[in-house]
Image: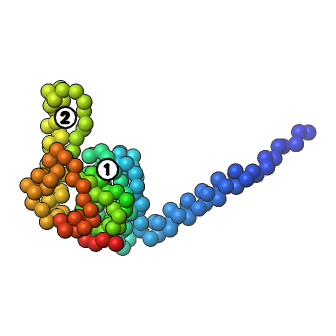
Amino acid sequence: MVQPKIEAETDATKKDDSSTTVKEKINTKLYENRVILFNKYIDEETSTQFCKELYALSFENASPINIKLTTRGGSFGAVYNMVSAIEAIKKTIEINCVCAGISASGGIDVMLPCSKRIAHRTTIFLLHHHSVTASGRYDEHIDLRVKDDMIAKMRVAAVAKYSNLSFEEVWEKMDRKEWWLTPEEMLSYGMLDEIL
C-alpha cells in the first residue's frame, strides 16, 4: 500500500498565510472605520473598485465616509465615474477627503465635490487643461482637440463650482498650461476647507 505524501508546511507558506490574515484584518478595520484608501492611477478598474467601496459603505449606515487620497489623476471617464458617485452619496452622507503627497489632475476633480476637503501641509496640487496628448499634425487630430476643449470646459466649470473663482478666472489659470498650487493657495481659492 502506498502511503499518501504529506507536504511539510514551509516558512514561505506560513508567511503567505499570515500576510493574508493581516491584509484581511486591515481591510476589515478600514471598512469598520469607514475609510477608503485611494493611491492609484484612475482608470476603469480602480474607479469601479472605488465606487464599489463607496456604495458599500453608504448602504451600511449613514455615518461619515472618509477618503484618503493620493493620485496623479487618470482617465476623464473613470474620474467622473468617481465624482458622480460622490455627488450622489453626499446628498445623504457626509464624505470627507484628506489629500496627501500629490493630488493632481483628476485627483482634484475627485476631491472637490466632497463634503469636507482637507490636505496635509506637504501636499502638492496640480490642475491643467485636459489633453489626449496625441502626436502628429493638428489637422489629423481635430476631433480629439474638440473633445479636449469640451472636457476642459467641464473641468473648469467643476473647479469654479467648488471654489470662489469664476469660470473665466479658472479658465485663464488652466488654459493650455499646468497650474501648480500649494495647500495655502487651495485654501485661499476655497478649494480646501482645512490644512493639517
Above or below for 65 versus 76: below
Percent x, y of residue 149: 14, 42
Quadrant location of the N terminus?
top right
Going 81% across and 47% down the picture, which residue do you hit? 6
Above or below for 120 versus 180: below
Tell me the kind of residue under disc 1.
Answer: Gly
Q: Is residue 4 left or right of residue 104?
A: right
Q: Nearer the viewer, residue 115 or 74?
A: 74
Tag 2, which secondary structure? helix
Query: How far apart are the alpha carbons under marks 1 and 2?
Result: 19 Å
Q: Where residue 144 is drawn, which disc sits there?
A: 2
Q: Nearer the viewer, residue 3 or 161?
A: 161
Disc 1 vs disc 2: Cβ atoms closer than 8 Å? no
Q: Nearer the viewer, residue 140 or 14?
A: 140
Going 21% across and 44% down the picture, which residue do you hit? 130
Can residue 15 be spotted in the picture? yes
Q: Which residue is mark 1?
A: 73
Quadrant location of the C terminus?
bottom left
Percent x, y of residue 29: 50, 68
Mark 2 neighbour density, 10 Å: few (under 14) some (14–19) many (20 or more): some
